[in-house]
Image (cartoon, rainbow, N blue to C red):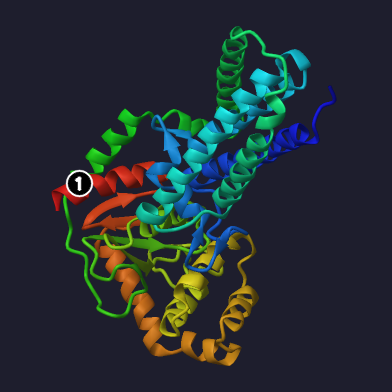
């Protein structure tokens, strides 16, 4: 009996879902380690944000293993079962196993779609692609039911073989993913390490941080219970990593977290604590950020500068402002105004009084926290502080 074309279609569907899941896994590790850019092809408007979804607690299993990595292993198993079903003696039971395999994948898709809609309240475009593939997968396998009824029955022991193949595929894929994608430093952090770090930081003494109502850029909920103040430099690599790991917290907890940006450029051109030229465009970028905040474009400007940190220049700053509707003359006049210079000076002096010596330095409900940490550490810290303050 010839092999039906729909069986080849099942193989193609599993390969496609495997590839998408593998890419999602790679993206998961980028997000968790603070290397993912703010915006990618799957960040669209206010509805689709792959970074926020991948940084949510629902994106991992058993503490650190990405759900997408498990999905990749699942489709690797489906591919092997489909390959076995090509053999006539294995075809009938293989198609039965594929039906169970596809239905399980679709049920998981429906469950996680429900989670995205009701819990995360954002959608992942790549997840929806996999959901669509799962729907087609079930439909194709179901359409072969009548065909499979005419095939010779195979021994029930074949189902044990399918189960073993599935487990082996999942284990090998998991080990391969951990070895290929994950950051070695990230792997060294167990859940106990994360909880210990979060508890230690949550116990730091609280300081009174001066508040200048309406002057500093705010993201998240202006009245959120947890305020994260960040003293930052747009040319500081650690600030970029910190931005990439803290930003998902704003997305994940839109009602809880209030994020406030403050300037602390590490350059002698504007910061008296820095005795040398370190970051030649940091002062300009900070003043421009204050100006763009006044025009209602801080978030886009902030994200663009960090996404293009290696290319920052005076020209890039003005080009991005123009792209956001602020002319070169308007931005230049604002940056040179005494008011903006005073705002920058005030941030730097407040930072000095608060003991800011490096960037990024965060104040989380007054607790001074220096350096960039993984998203998982920030999540644990927020959960700790939420119960304390």
State how many labels appear. 1
Q: Is residue 207 left or right of residue 66?
A: left
Q: At 40% across and 43% down in the image, what residue appears?
A: 58
Q: x, y (%) of residue 127?
A: 55, 48
Q: x, y (%) of residue 296?
A: 44, 81
Q: Nearer the viewer, residue 311 or 189?
A: 189
Q: Is residue 116 left or right of residue 387?
A: right
Q: At 48% across and 39% down in the image, what residue appears?
A: 107
> Is disc 1 surrounded by few (<14), some (14 to 19) or many (20+) residues within 10 Å?
few
Which image quarter is the N terminus in? top right
**Measured along the vertical axis of the image, is residue 228 above or below residue 320?**
above
The residue carrying mark 1 is 204
Q: Nearer the viewer, residue 25 or 352?
A: 25
Q: Nearer the viewer, residue 88 or 57?
A: 88
**Measured along the vertical axis of the image, is residue 322 above or below residue 24?**
below
The answer to whether any part of residue 279 appears in the image is: no
**Measured along the vertical axis of the image, is residue 46 above or below residue 94?**
below
Q: Quadrant of residue 191?
A: top left
Q: Quadrant of residue 167?
A: top right
Q: Is residue 149 left or right of residue 294?
A: right
Q: Quadrant of residue 44?
A: bottom right
Q: x, y (%) of residue 270?
A: 44, 73
Q: Nearer the viewer, residue 116 or 243?
A: 116
Q: Determine the residue located farthest toward the right in the rendered image.
A: 2
The answer to whether any part of residue 377 appears in the image is: yes
Q: Secondary structure at mark 1?
A: loop
Q: x, y (%) of residue 121?
A: 40, 58
Q: At 64% across and 43% down in the image, what residue appears?
A: 20
């Amino acid at each position: 009996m010839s092999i039906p074309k729909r069986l080849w279609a099942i193989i193609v569907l599993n390969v496609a879902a495997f590839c998408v899941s593998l890419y999602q896994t790679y993206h998961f590790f980028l997000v968790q380690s603070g290397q993912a850019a703010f915006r990618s092809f799957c960040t669209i408007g206010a509805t689709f944000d792959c970074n926020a979804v991948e940084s949510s607690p629902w994106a991992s299993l058993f503490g650190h293993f990405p759900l997408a990595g498990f999905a990749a292993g699942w489709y690797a198993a489906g591919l092997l079962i489909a390959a076995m079903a090509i053999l006539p003696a294995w075809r009938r039971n293989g198609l039965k196993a594929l039906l169970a395999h596809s239905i399980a994948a679709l049920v998981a898709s429906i469950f996680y779609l429900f989670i995205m809609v009701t819990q995360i309240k954002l959608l992942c475009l790549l997840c929806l692609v996999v959901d669509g593939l799962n729907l087609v997968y079930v439909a194709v396998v179901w359409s072969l039911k009548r065909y499979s009824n005419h095939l010779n029955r195979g021994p029930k022991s074949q189902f044990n073989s399918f189960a073993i193949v599935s487990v082996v595929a999942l284990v090998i894929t998991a080990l391969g993913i951990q070895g290929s994608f994950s950051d070695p430093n990230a792997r060294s952090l167990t859940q106990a390490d994360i909880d210990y770090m979060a508890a230690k930081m949550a116990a730091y003494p609280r300081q009174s941080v001066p508040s200048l109502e309406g002057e500093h850029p705010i993201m998240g909920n202006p009245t959120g219970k947890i305020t994260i103040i960040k003293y930052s430099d747009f040319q500081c690599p650690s600030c970029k990593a910190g931005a990439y790991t803290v930003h998902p917290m704003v997305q994940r907890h839109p009602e809880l977290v209030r994020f406030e940006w403050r300037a602390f450029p590490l350059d002698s051109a504007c910061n008296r604590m820095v005795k040398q030229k370190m970051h030649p465009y940091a002062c300009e970028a900070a003043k421009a950020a204050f100006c763009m905040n006044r025009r209602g474009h801080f978030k886009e400007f902030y994200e663009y500068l960090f996404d293009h940190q290696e290319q920052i220049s005076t020209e890039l700053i003005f080009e991005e402002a123009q792209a956001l509707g602020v002319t070169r003359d308007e931005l230049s006049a604002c940056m040179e105004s005494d008011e903006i210079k005073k705002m920058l000076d005030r941030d730097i002096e407040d930072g000095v009084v608060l003991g800011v010596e490096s960037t990024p330095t965060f104040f989380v409900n007054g607790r001074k926290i220096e350096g960039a940490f993984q998203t998982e550490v920030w999540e644990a810290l927020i959960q700790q502080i939420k119960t304390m303050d």
